[in-house]
Image: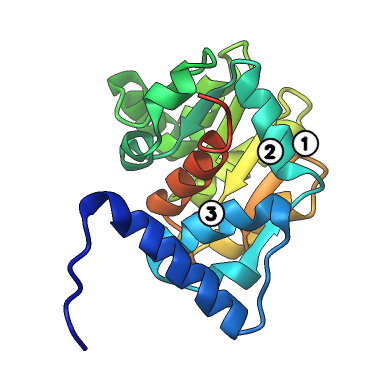
């Protein structure tokens, strides 16, 4: 195996060519609407399992595009995901990437209530009084709290990206939204992470006019 001499601007293009070729060789051909999301998640992780575990509600990508074009914010559950999302691209349409996890009052409230910062962060996001795309890549408690607020009749998310990674409550939390009528992109199973949440957001952003 030889090291290839590839220019910086060609690295991503060549990576996507390899991903596309490998998917075809394994008999997996993502449908056109969702292909960019699936391929960017594979690109971010080098994990081809995303071609079979990513789950999309009806017209999920189209709905997410409309929300972004309408100025929706993206709320994440980690500053890592926030940093990975193309804020400049989102700002073209009037949106902002937000994360409340590191705010001191969120930390204080979570400690006083004996709950997680992720749960309190979702409550803060619910009070933004604007359309929000939730990009959850780390904390299943964020998904659980969003679903609880739906059940309580106090809030309904516009869109949920549910890709937390791990083993404790991760799969059940994802299934809450996979089984719901809320527009969503969910990765079934324990895999996911902040990089995957950001990759999904960027895949959709890069399909919009600049």
Find the distance from the CA under tag 1 to the CA under tag 2.
Answer: 5 Å
Quarter of the image where the N terminus is located: bottom left
Query: Which residue is found at the position 43% from the left and 50% from the top?
Result: 138
Q: Quadrant of residue 193?
A: bottom left
The residue wearing badge 1 is 151
Find the distance from the CA under tag 3 to the CA under tag 1.
Answer: 21 Å
Query: Which residue is found at the position 77% from the left and 39% from the top?
Result: 182
Percent across and percent down for residue 166 are: 44, 64
Residue neighbourhood size for the residue with mark 1, other residues' Cα within 10 Å, grouped as few (<14), some (14–19), many (≥20): few
Residue neighbourhood size for the residue with mark 3, other residues' Cα within 10 Å, grouped as few (<14), some (14–19), many (≥20): many
Dot 3 or dot 1: first in sequence order is 1
Instruction: Determine whether the residue tagged by mark 2 lies in a helix, strand or loop.
Output: helix
The residue wearing badge 2 is 148
Q: Closest to the observer: 30 or 60?
A: 30
Q: Are marks 1 and 2 in contact (CB under 8 Å)?
A: yes
- Establish if 54 lies above or below 90: below
Q: Quadrant of residue 69?
A: top right
Labels 3, 1: front one? 3
Q: Is residue 80 left or right of residue 94?
A: left
Find the distance from the CA under tag 2 to the CA under tag 3.
Answer: 18 Å
Query: Which residue is found at the position 60% from the left and 39% from the top?
Result: 145
The residue wearing badge 3 is 163
Labels 2, 3: front one? 3
Q: Closest to the observer: 65 or 12?
A: 12
As drawn, which residue projects farthest toward the bottom? 1
Residue 134 seen by the camera: yes
| The disc label shown at residue 71, or none | none
């Amino acid at each position: 195996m030889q090291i290839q001499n590839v220019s910086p601007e060609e690295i991503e293009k060549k990576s996507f060519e390899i991903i596309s070729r490998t998917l075809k060789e394994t008999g997996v051909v993502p449908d056109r609407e969702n292909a960019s999301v699936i391929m960017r998640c594979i690109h971010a992780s080098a994990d081809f399992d995303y071609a079979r575990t990513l789950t999309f509600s009806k017209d999920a990508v189209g709905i997410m595009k409309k929300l972004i074009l309408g100025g929706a914010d993206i709320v994440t559950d980690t500053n890592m995901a926030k940093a990975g999302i193309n804020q400049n691209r989102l700002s073209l349409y009037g949106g902002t990437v937000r994360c409340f996890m590191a705010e001191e009052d969120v930390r204080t409230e979570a400690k006083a209530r004996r709950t997680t910062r992720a749960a309190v962060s979702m409550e803060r996001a619910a009070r933004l009084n604007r359309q929000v795309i939730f990009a959850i890549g780390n904390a299943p408690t964020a998904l659980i709290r969003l679903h609880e607020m739906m059940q309580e009749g106090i809030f309904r998310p516009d869109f949920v990206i549910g890709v937390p990674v791990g083993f404790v409550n991760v799969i059940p939390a994802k299934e809450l939204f996979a089984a719901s009528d809320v527009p969503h992109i969910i990765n079934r199973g324990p895999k996911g992470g902040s990089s995957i949440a950001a990759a999904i957001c960027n895949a959709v952003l890069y399909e919009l006019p600049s």
